[in-house]
Image: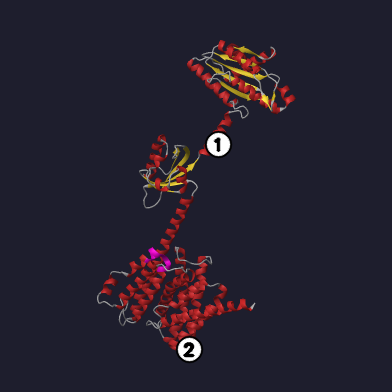
Amino acid sequence: MRSHHVPARAAQVAGPLAFAVGYFALSRLGLAFLSDGHVALLWPASGLALGVLVAVPRRAWPRYLIAVLVANLAAQAWARGLDAPAVGLAAVNALEPLLAAWTLQAIASSRTRPTFESTREVAGLVAAATLANAVTAVLGAAVIAAAFGAPFGRAWGQWWLADGLGMLTVAPAAMMLHWERPVRADLRSSAFVAATWVLAAVICWQPVPGLPELLHRSHAMLPLLLWVAVRYGARSVALALAGVSAIATIATAGGSGPFAAGADAGASADALQGFIAVAILSTLFVASVVAERRRAEGELRTIFESAPAGKAVVGADGAIANANRALAQLAGRTRERLCTMAAASLVRAEDRAPLAAAIADVCADRAVTVELEAGLVGVGGVDTTVSIHVVPLDGEQSTRALLHVLDVSERKRFEAELRDLADHDPLTGLLNRRRFEGEVERQLAQARRYERPGAVMLLDVDRFKQINDTYGHGVGDRLIVGVADALRTRLRAADTIARLGGDEFAVLLPEIDCDGVEEVARELVAAVAAHTTCADGRVLPRVTISVGVATFGARTELSREALVVAADVAMYRAKEAGRNGYAIGDERAAADVA
């Protein structure tokens, strides 16, 4: 058991102890460069304390706050002696990171690790440092004013800036160095960070006469820091800022560099702190904005690449600039090959002009979005029905569009099946009653316009109920299918046959005279009577039909309902006459029925 507890206890002591050593060193550095208000030009120890408190769990905060108090008290005693003001300043400096850490976590509304790759995290850090130091600066300025007779307002302002900038300078680097430990250093980013330090040293310590002034007047430092922020992100720019701030502070305190104002220590402090504030805020916010944009671009790229539907970025001329894997698979081509083609070349010849027009309209802002269906031609010449949505692609290049290409061939097949089910009898495959009635209406209109006669037949299987009751519905269904097959073989391609329901069928005969009608009726009766139906290896009993016919003339005024009723009456006459036959009613009989 002890082998498990000893390392944990050692870590609980070693962490705060190492932190105390670092805090003491940074406190000594800050106390070495005091302004005229007895306040440090920059207080980096506060940034280290904030970074560590945010990094460790809250249950460990008391140990680290004690380390802050002891280390600060030791640094104050070393510089000024151990007295009541030293104890008061040490207590204020211990309260400062506590307030800042609590404020930062409250603003961030989470305990996640800050990476400063979002503007919200940078703004949270700025707000936490500003608010916490505004409070503690009141206490610290009161101690300094009482102990050293310094003006309260001047002491408050310098404390607020020195400690706030110390947090903004060191805390981001401390947090990211704690959480982000790369396996190997990025040599390019390290080189640019080192370049910012070298440039700061050249400007501040003036090794070459005239050059530092030229670099300072040309504001060479800020562009280099911004480049590091844009190219290498928050971690690298935080390290660069920490080094530049340290170099500028040491040089200014020694009376060297562009921020030193000779005997006017207050002016030197203002110039230095102003530069550090501008550098920190501009570079951290730029780094966070660039990181957010890169993250958004990465997310969009992932969505684009992994989308199950085909996607392509096209220009106003229809040339494909980028395509995802789904489109390459759908088109049967590699992505590299697609990027050398025009979008219109992927579809059938008759679909190319509409697609090109849609792309041009969207790119020219003449349409917000365009949807069309086309046939996507694969490498083997096989067409795939696709739905193409053309939408504008927002961004710097507004003359581009995004194509969403979705395979709808299965949907089209299901739609065709649904339409077929809506118009056809599922057992026999013949037209159903609804579709047949529509065909009769259309044929009557043709007869009136073009003077074309015709006829409607109703057919009923004789004694079908008895067959159903004797042999079962399965056999009855097979007989119905057999009757449908027999009727099909005796009709013309222009004729229409339908199953109205049960054992009742209907036939529409366009452009036929009375003699032809009678011949067709006779052939249908004979065909059904002679038809043999087999099921499960046995021959089913033969059936017969009774047929009723109603004819209509070239300029008929009959309605569909009257014509069908007349055929039905004629069919029952055929049944009364002994079944297995037909009866014909002319247009006059149909008019009498109507």
> Comparing marks 1 and 2, which lies closer to the viewer?
1
Tell whether 103 sits left or right of 322.
right
Residue 106: percent from the left, percent from the top? 52, 68
Residue positioned most to the right: 470
Name the image colouring.
secondary structure
Query: Could you say where residue 518 lies in the image, as x and y percent from the top left?
Result: 59, 12
Magenta region includes residue 285: no
Gap between marks 1 and 2 measured at Cα: 90 Å
SS at mark 1? helix
Q: Position of residue 452 (x, y in %)?
A: 50, 15
| Front position in the image: 35 or 188 | 188
Instruction: Identify the residue at horizontal 46%, vertical 51% (top origin).
Output: 305
Q: Is residue 233 magenta?
A: yes
Q: Is residue 170 above or below residue 412?
A: below
**Residue labelled with disc 1:** 414
Residue found at x 60% / y 14%:
523
Question: Of the residues shown, which amino acid type is indicated by label 2?
Answer: Asp
Judge by depth and name the residue closer to the eye, 161 or 46.
Answer: 46
Residue 413 in the image: above or below residue 270: above
Magenta stretch: give its range: 228-236
Quadrant the N terminus occupies: bottom right
Residue for badge 2: 83
SS category of the residue bearing label 2: loop
Question: In the rendered structure, are the residues bearing label 1 and label 2 in contact, judged by CB atoms less than 8 Å apart?
Answer: no
Q: Earlier in the sequence, mark 1 or mark 2?
A: 2
